[in-house]
Amino acid sequence: MQQLTDPFGRSIEYVRLSVTDRCDLRCFYCMPKGFNDFEAPEHWLSFDEIERVIAAFARLGTRRVRITGGEPLVRKDLPSLAARLYALPGIDDLSLSTNAVQLARHARALKAAGVQRLNVSLDTPDPRRFRDITGGKLEKVIDGLMAAKAAGFSPIKINMVVMKGVNDDDVEAMVEFCITHGFTLRFIETMPMGDTGRGANAHYLPLDIVRKRIEQRHDLVPGVMPGGGPARYMRVVGSDLRIGFITPMSQHFCATCNRVRLSVDGTLYLCLGQDHTFELRPLLRDGITDAALDEAIRQAIALKPERHEFNDKPGQVVRFMSMTGG
């Protein structure tokens, strides 16, 4: 099998695939209130086009695909796309990131389609605070999580963006929630991805502070979890809970970055914290051959930078997470 390698010797084996830039929540750090500058549907990659691109990545050695958004479950017939991707030779790890608002209706179909693992964004277990952060209803997320458990998904990872002065006092409650329900918990530092209305930068909290707070109540030992992402895991002694720490700011993981992002309009983002991109949609719609598509992807990977510059140039990237993909 071929192998995609970037200029710094990193093997690119992981594609985060955004199937929409739209969402049914409005988390202030991701999509500002009143934002409506969405990609026109005619610019979205079709399922056929998505399958072609992921098949090309698979031919080049990529084996992990995570379906993201926006909120991927707002894309019509998503389970059918998942089934097509799971059937591709070489793809052996298909996962989904979701806010779980619509998961109760789709969990069984997604499991049957071949989605193996779920990451669910949930920043607080408090209904009022959830509404303040997202504009949505927490009970829909809980219903989705319970439906995913019933459908047999395991592990189910809860992603909590920890924000100073917003939800940092929910950390202990989220630990207990995940112990009770058998979920994995992952804490994520906020990143400076443009002005999203209330300023995520002002809420940055290093996760070593969070870890020390947890250690006041629980003993932590090193742990491991399956997946291709950057989390560093600890296990809570006396339970099955694994806690992951994702630290793009305080301890960046650029040296081991194995991923690229494909947006809904066919743009490859080579780094979340840089503006290096490669446009695939025009090539697809001009009738590019499979061999030429493979070569175009190699050319794109050659543009991947060594590292982000969030700390050095916090205002450099001005785009919303919903546009790039999670």
Image: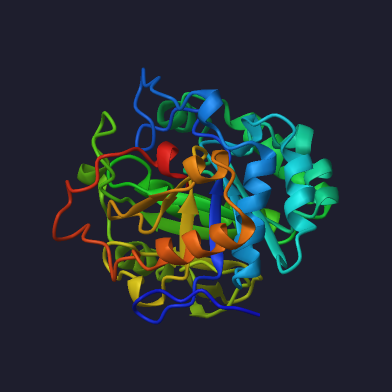
Q: Which residue is drawn at 47% across and 53% down?
A: 261
Residue 306, image quadrant? bottom left
Query: For the image shown, how many numbered marks are present on the structure?
Result: 0
Residue furthest to the left: 312
Task: Name above or below for residue 166 compared with residue 34.
Answer: below
Q: Residue at x 27, y 55 (%)?
A: 274
Q: Which of 32 and 78 is in front in this view?
A: 78
Q: Position of residue 130 (x, y in %)?
A: 48, 32
Task: Name above or below for residue 59 compared with residue 164.
Answer: below
Q: Which image quarter is the N terminus in?
A: bottom right
Residue 24 seen from this side: no
Q: Which residue is drawn at 82% across and 49% down?
A: 113
Residue 293 seen from this side: yes
Colour scheme:
rainbow
Q: Position of residue 267 (x, y in %)?
A: 44, 45
Task: Name above or below for residue 115 compared with residue 126.
Answer: below
In the displayed structure, does residue 9 sit left or right of residue 220?
A: left
Residue 29, image quadrant? top left
Q: Position of residue 220 (x, y in %)?
A: 49, 77
Q: Which of 326 and 83 is in front in this view?
A: 83
In the displayed structure, does residue 94 sit left or right of residue 187?
A: right
Task: Name above or below for residue 311 compared with residue 201.
Answer: below
Q: Position of residue 45 (x, y in %)?
A: 58, 37
Q: Nearer the viewer, residue 16 or 291?
A: 291
In the displayed structure, does residue 84 sit left or right of residue 231?
A: right
